[in-house]
Image: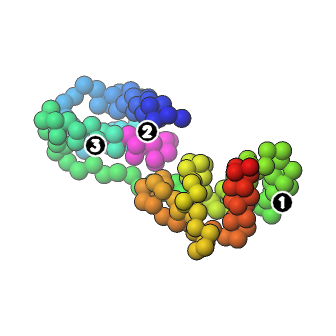
Amino acid sequence: SSAHGLALKGRDGELRRWSRHLLPTLGKRRISELAPQDVEAIKTAMTGRAPASVRNCLEMLRRIVRWGNRQQLCPPLPFELSMPHVFNETTEFLTAEELGRLLAVLEDWPDRSVARMLQVALYTGLRKSELFRLEDRDLDFEHGLILLRNPKGGRDCSVPLTPPVAEILRDQIAWRNE
C-alpha cells in the first residue's frame, strides 16, 4: 500500500479513537479543565478493551495536548498521564505435524518464487515488509548475514543467513536473473 494510504488508515483510526473514546468522556472541555479523574474516566469507559487500545487513546490525548501546547493553543496538561502497561507479545509455534504439512505444500507449490519467499520467512522470522524490501546488497553470503534496513524497530540490524536460507536465496536470485 502507498504511504498516502497508510496515512489515511492511521488518520481514520485516530478519528475513531477520538469519537468513540475521548469525546464522549471529555466532551468539549478545555485542556486547563482536565484532571486525573478524567483520565480515569476514560480508562473506566474502556473497561474490557485491550490494554493497548487504552494506551493508544491516552497516547493520542497526550500527543494532541503536546502539539497544541507547542503551537501555543493550549497549556500543557497540569498532571502526568499514567499509561497502562502493555504486555501483548505472543509467540506462536507450528507443531511438528503442521510444519511438515506446510513444507510439503511449499515443496509442491506451483509458483516457486512464492514458495521460496515463504520458506525464507519461515526460517528467518522476517516480516513481510522486511522480506519485500531485501536487495542483493543486503545479503552477505560470505559472513552469513542478512541486513535489515529500516525494520519495524527503526534501527538497521542483521539476522543470521543460515546455509539452508542462503541456498533458497541463491535459487531465488538465479530464477530472477534468468
Give the percent coordinates (x, y) of residue 104: 86, 55
Question: Residue flagged by tag 1: what amino acid is it?
Answer: Gly
The earlier-in-sequence mark between 1 and 2 is 2
Nearer the observer, disc 3 or disc 1? Answer: 1
Residue 37 left/right relative to 131? left
Q: What amino acid is labelled 3 in the image?
A: Arg
Q: Residues within 10 Å of mark 3 (few under 14, many from 20)?
A: some
Q: Is residue 57 located in the magenta-colored stretch of the structure?
A: yes
Calculate the distance from the C-alpha at mark 2 to the C-alpha at mark 3: 17 Å
**165 w.r.t. 68: above or below:** below
Q: CA distance from mark 1 to mark 2?
A: 42 Å
Give residue 46's mark. Answer: 2
Question: Residue 24, labelled with which disc?
Answer: none
Q: Quadrant of the N terminus?
A: top right
Q: Secondary structure at mark 3?
A: helix
Pointer 3 residue: 62
The residue type indicated by label 2 comes to: Met
- The residue where tag 1 is placed is 100
Location of residue 168 in the rendering, given as x and y in whole percent from the top left corner = 73, 60
Residue 83 visible in image = yes
Q: Main secondary structure of the magenta part?
A: helix
Query: Would residue 26 be found to the left or right of residue 135 on screen?
Result: left
Labels in figure, total: 3
**Spatial separation of the CA atoms under disc 3 and disc 1:** 48 Å
Q: Which residue is at the front of the view, 111 or 85? A: 111
Does residue 145 sit above or below 87 in this rendering? below
Question: Residue 7's image quarter?
Answer: top left
Q: Is residue 147 magenta?
A: no
Q: Where, by quadrant of the figure, is residue 154 drawn?
A: bottom left
- Tell me whether circle 2 and circle 3 mark residues in contact (CB < 8 Å): no
For the record, the magenta segment spans: 47-58
